Image (cartoon, rainbow, N blue to C red):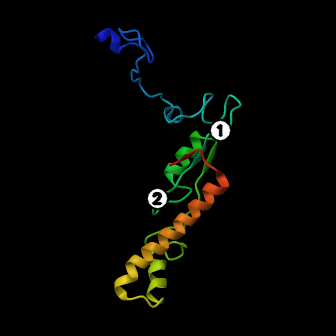
Amino acid sequence: RDADAAAPRGAADDAGGARDVPTRAAEDPASACGAPAGGPRGDAGLRPLRVLFMHGLESGPLGSKAQYLSGRFQAVETPDMQMSLWRIDRRNSLTRSLLRTVVSGLWPSQWVAGAMTESLAGCLEVQRAAVADFRPDVVV
């Protein structure tokens, strides 16, 4: 049924019912992920799609992925989680949390787990506040 394979989305099948034929994703990544008509930047007077980006361990709000999203969406929020594996000047650094855990009186067998829990809790708090304040449509 080669002719049916080229039929547009929503075309009727032989029994007269509608069928769903997959189509190629749009070139614009925002439209492929459900941005409103008029574009992700609010071109048609619609409210722009609000994107919250959670950066990686050693990245931040100025990383390449955050910049990519900011260039394609009008409303992008990338809160700095102050996370790093080694940099103790970062508030949620694993090494900084490990140093605090060591002096907290926990047993040595609990140091790494305690530090990881503390760092993760700090990062989650940053994201919780961002969701509450920014009210995103999409979280990446």
Mark 1 — residue? 48
Left or right, 45 with respect to 18, comes to right
Left or right, 36 with respect to 120, comes to right
Frontmost of labels 2 and 1 is 1
User: Toward which corner of the image does residue 82 lie, by quadrant?
Assistant: bottom right
Tell me the distance, in whole angstroms, between the alpha carbons under discs 2 and 1. Answer: 25 Å
In x, y percent, where is residue 113?
39, 76
Label ID, residue 126: none
Residue 73, placed above or below residue 114: above
User: Toward which corner of the image does residue 50 lie, by quadrant?
Assistant: top right
Amino acid at the residue labelled 1: Pro
First in residue order: circle 2 vs circle 1: 1
- Residue at 61% across / 40% down in the picture? 49
Label 1 neighbourhood size at 10 Å, few (<14), some (14-19), many (20+)? many
In x, y percent, where is residue 135?
64, 50
Mark 2 — residue? 56
